[in-house]
Amino acid sequence: MTPELYRPVATDRIGPEGLSVVVEATEAERIALAKRLGLPAVHALSCQFDLRGLPGETVAAAGYLSAQLAQVCVVSLDEFEAAVEERFVIHFVPQGRLSDDPDPGSPDEIPYSRGEIDLGEAAAEQLALALDPYPRRPDAALPEQGDKTALHPFAGLAAWRSH
């Protein structure tokens, strides 16, 4: 299956000086990504990758992702516009050579095969990781709480007990 945002780069194109690549999503790709990520819309998505080869056919990628999108507020359920900007470092590693490094500070590893890395899918994954899991419109406020005893999970049992 081809991902929504497919930008293959042959690893042999990455010379000793490295390679810089910009991935920009088209309108159709943004619509497909919004559907995949459960977003109302992705208005713009751009990702700059600075690639360099490492020993063992590993490719290091320092990236900068910028996106404009619509999200749904968890408080009001209203759509609102949001910006996502994220710097990241990832490593593309040949299939079957992922490290066993448990350090959460080490770069994420993405397997590749056939001498080709997919920068589009890497950009889509970085966007998914950068999204706020509980998006909240900047001016959203929780409704005022009235009688707090009625909200208590055992309020109904307490009333029953008093009989």
Image (tube, rainbow, N blue to C red):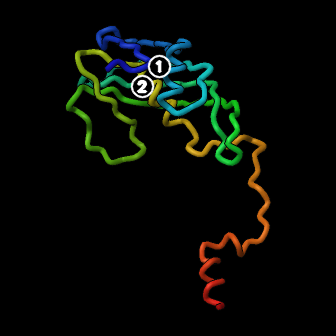
In which quadrant of the rendered view does residue 17 lie? top left
State how many labels appear: 2
SS at badge 2: helix
Residue 129, x across and y down, in percent: 49, 36
Quadrant in which residue 142 is drawn: bottom right
Please tell me in which quadrant of the rendered image residue 149 appears: bottom right
Dot 1 falls on a residue whose secondary structure is strand
- Label 2: how many residues lie within 10 Å, few (<14), some (14-19) or many (20+)? many
Q: Which residue is mark 2?
A: 122
Q: Residue furthest left?
A: 96
Residue on which disc 1 sits: 49
Contact? badges 2 and 1 (CB < 8 Å): yes
Q: Amino acid at mark 2?
A: Ala
Residue drawn 42% across and 12% down?
A: 19
Identify the mark at residue 62; answer none if there is no mark. none
Q: Residue at x 64, y 29 (%)?
A: 70
The quadrant of the image that shows the C terminus is bottom right
Q: Is residue 26 above or below residue 86?
A: above
Lateral position of residue 65 relative to residue 50, left or right: right
Going 31% across and 11% down the picture, which residue do you hit?
Answer: 10
Residue sitting at 38 percent across and 21 percent down?
3
Q: Is residue 153 above or below residue 142?
A: below
Query: Of label 2 and label 1, which has the lower sequence position?
Result: 1
Residue 108 image position (x, y, % from top left): 38, 36
Hey, what amino acid is under mark 1?
Phe
User: Toward the viewer: 96 or 154?
Assistant: 154
Residue 33, position as x, y percentages in the image: 50, 24
| Mark 1 residue crowding within 10 angstroms, few (<14) / some (14–19) / many (20+) | many
